[in-house]
Amino acid sequence: MKKKLTLIILLLLPATLMAWQASISGKVSSINHNEPLAGVIIKVKGSPQVTTTDSLGKFSIRVNQENEVLELSYLGFKPLSVNAKIGQVLSLQLSPDINALQEVVVSTGLQRLPKERSTGSFVQINQELLIGR
């Protein structure tokens, strides 16, 4: 009897552990062009679990609780926090974080030369030039 009980417990243990190691998956894209975003960092809040999206914007992350908060971050986009449930397939869109670039100063770090003494071709980069590209 003891052997049968031990055998049943050993057979049910992996299924119980797998239930606690479920996952949440989905796809992340840009809200402007609906293009997939590769390399978006996805973190489970309050947990060391972290993953990134693949080249198609898809991800899958293991979670331990039924309801989790996912935190998404990507360079040039606003961070996003989302409530998600185990087994849920998400379709998420990130908004661009637009910061106007006012002025860029380029220096050699060694000296500062006036325009009259400089030789070669120089262009002052401004917002109009950057927008035109």
Image (cartoon, rainbow, N blue to C red):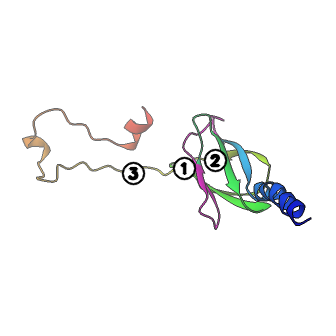
Q: Is residue 129 left or right of residue 86?
A: left
In the image, is residue 63 part of the stretch drawn in magenta?
no
Q: Nearer the viewer, residue 65 or 70?
A: 65
Whole-number angstrom distance, CA of label 1 to CA of label 3: 23 Å
Secondary structure at badge 2 equals strand
Label ID, residue 102: 3
In front: mark 2 or mark 1? 1
Q: Position of residue 86 (x, y in %)?
A: 79, 54
Whole-number angstrom distance, CA of label 3 to CA of label 2: 24 Å
Q: Is residue 114 left or right of residue 15?
A: left
Please, what is the dominant secondary structure of the magenta stretch? loop
Residue wearing tag 2: 94
Q: Which residues are magenta?
A: 30-51
Give the amino acid at mark 2.
Answer: Leu
Q: Position of residue 20 (x, y in %)?
A: 76, 59
Give the amino acid at mark 1.
Answer: Tyr
Whole-number angstrom distance, CA of label 2 to CA of label 1: 8 Å
Residue wearing tag 1: 74
Precedes in sequence: disc 2 or disc 1:
1
Identify which residue is drawn at 67% across, 51% down: 61
Precedes in sequence: disc 1 or disc 3:
1
> Pointer 2 and pointer 1: residues touching (CB < 8 Å)?
yes
In the image, is residue 46 part of the stretch drawn in magenta?
yes
Precedes in sequence: disc 3 or disc 2:
2
Identify which residue is drawn at 61% across, 58% down: 49
Q: Position of residue 133 (x, y in %)?
A: 42, 31
Q: Position of residue 81 (x, y in %)?
A: 67, 58
Q: Is residue 111 left or right of residue 29?
A: left
> Pointer 3 and pointer 2: residues touching (CB < 8 Å)?
no
Secondary structure at badge 1 equals loop
In front: mark 3 or mark 2? 2
